[in-house]
Image (tube, helix red, strand yellow):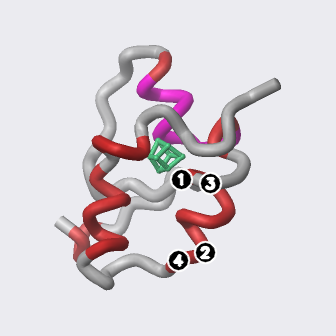
Amino acid sequence: MSQKVCKWYPVCPLKFYYEQGRLDEKWIKNYCMGDWECCIRYQMEERGELHPDYMLPNGEVREELA
Ligand code: SF4
């Protein structure tokens, strides 16, 4: 059984964007508290691959978050 919240959540930049009111809650609900295994950020993190802080769980890059 997988855990409910993504293990990277406490240190994920998307958590901080969300807390700053700059990121729609759907990302947190659908990925961080849901299907985190489907998150591109999560998958890249697991492979040790670099990815920008402002990349969304679906791989979309939102430079305005930077
Ligand atoms: S954005 Fe992805 S890596 Fe970050 S906490 Fe959410 S599910 Fe995990």
Magenta-highlighted residues: 38-45
Q: CA distance from mark 2 to mark 1?
A: 11 Å
> Which residue lies under the disc numbered 1?
57
Residue 4: give x, y in percent of width and height.
67, 43
Quarter of the C terminus within the rendering: bottom left
Crowding near the residue tagged with mark 1, few <14, some 14–19, many ≥20 C-alpha atoms within 10 Å: many
**Above-or-below relation of 30 to 4:** below
Residue 5 sits in quarter = top right
> Which residue lies under the disc numbered 2?
26
Q: CA distance from mark 4 to mark 1?
A: 12 Å
Q: Is residue 17 magenta?
A: no
Q: CA distance from mark 2 to mark 4?
A: 4 Å
> Which residue lies under the disc numbered 4?
25
Marks 2 & 4, CB-CB < 8 Å contact? yes
Q: CA distance from mark 3 to mark 1?
A: 12 Å
Q: Disc 3 on helix, strand or loop?
A: loop
> Which of pointers 2 and 1 lies earlier in the amino acid sequence?
2
